[in-house]
Image (cartoon, rainbow, N blue to C red):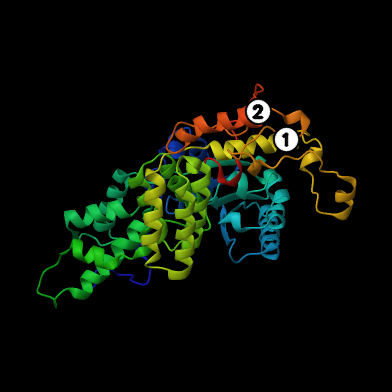
Amino acid sequence: MAVVSAAHVPLAVRMRPRDVAEVLGQDHLLGPGRPLRRLVDGHGVASVVLHGPPGTGKTTIASLLSAATGREFVALSALTAGVKEVREVIEDSRMRLAAGVRTVLFIDEVHRFSKTQQDALLAAVEHQIVLLVAATTENPGFAVVSPLLSRSLVLELRPLAREDLDVLIGRALADERGYGGRVGLADDAREHLLRVSGGDARRLLTALEAAVDLAQAQAPESSGETAWEVSLEQVTASLDEAMVRYDRDGDQHYDVVSAFIKSIRGSDVDAALHYLARMVIAGEDPRFIARRLMIHASEDVGMADPTALSVATAAAQAVAIVGLPEARIILAQATIHLATAPKSNAVIQAIGAAEADVRAGRAGPVPQHLRDGHSSYARKTKKTAGYRYPHDTADGVLAQQYPPDELVGVDYYQPTNHGFERELSGRVPKLRNIVRGGPKTRRPPAPDNDTDPPGGGKG
């Protein structure tokens, strides 16, 4: 029994909304009086940059803009089009405009256009030769050149809510463009599809179609029944690892990595393992994950657990030797160690404060007695006279000036009371008191907490 009349056309394409009423999940843009709704209704001539996750309706909205306004619809993909193709489309649009026909130019994945390619659009957009609808999954502030942004409405599409996806399943099962009531879906299978689709309508429909195809292939020869049901087992068997939405070149990459590091920093070991699993399943380079763990070990654990860096470094070395799939176990162990370790950012705060002084010009001459004394000239002129060797004392510590004159008494490292640093918080002041001969100390200015520190900062 064939359940699809046009099997060569993907379900996601067949179910593309035909009008605004069928668009799901974007009421904040398409509600009455909203800017995008006004454009779709034929009011206004502003070009638009649509950004948001895959499967949220960017291409659909572009085609609706064209259809509702009676304009010619031309689509380009930034993956295949160059400046030459862009200029050809603009010239064709100019000729249509002379004949009274306007053009909607849709550019998918505009973030893949170079600056030169994007600049080629500016004049056509400014003079309204085309109504540009540019789609991107990236942050447009980084992915689109400023002159193009300033000439466009920038609108964000949201992932579809569970309720919207549920409506979409029902529509695909009942509508003649889909399965026309000839296919059923078990409740647990439906729930699983909703859970794994991640707010992506295209992914949901693709997964549903794969499950229906599998169920159809496994169905017995026609027994006179006009409808049959897809099971949970058939849904799960038809899914693969691509269902985990994680683009290693896009925002999802940075969002998941950021959530991974912030979960470790926040000592939520379970959340950290979740994000680790998402990266591993999506095919992230395990060496990249290991590098992030090494940075985190110093940045957010530091001297609160001095073994953290050793663990992270050993994990990185083991990952390089072992590789996947076993490397995921090693990464998990390192993640658990760091997530459960006491936390301190005193190390990165200390180097940040020292760097701030150097950049501000507080870097006087090295004290005479600390300068290198190995050359014959240094020995002859006794340039290092006065240096005292700490190991000549019983405690291995003695009073002596080490920093330049203008930084005497400055404290960069401020141990916390977390983990091993609790011991250092008592030891470091005693060392300073001996080395400085008992002088008062002063602290450097507090770093700006609104700025991510070097090496990844706040994730």
Q: Is residue 240 above or below residue 67?
A: below
Q: Is 90 in front, or is 96? A: 90
Snapshot quadrant of residue 118: bottom right
Image point (41%, 68%), residue name? 324
Sequence-first tag of 1 and 2: 1
Label disc, if present, on residue 403 of the rendered structure: 1
Q: Relative to 51, is 404 above or below? A: above
Quarter of the figure with residue 366: top right
Residue 442 locus on image (x, y percent)? 65, 24
Classify mark 2: residues with Cα within 10 Å, few (<14), some (14-19) or many (20+). some
The residue to which callout 2 is attached is: 444
Query: Percent from the top left, x then y, of residue 25?
Result: 38, 43
| Crowding near the residue tagged with mark 1, few <14, some 14–19, many ≥20 C-alpha atoms within 10 Å | some
Residue visible at 52% across and 56% down?
291
Tag 2 secondary structure: loop
Q: Say what amino acid the circle numbered 1 marks.
A: Pro
On the rendered structure, is 62 left or right of 174? right
Q: Position of residue 219 (x, y in %)?
A: 16, 73
Residue 6 drawn above or below residue 279: below
235 sits to left or right of 343: left
Query: Would you say residue 137 is visible in this rendering?
Result: no
User: Going 68% across and 44% down the picture, which residue do you hit?
Assistant: 146
Q: Secondary structure at mark 1?
A: loop
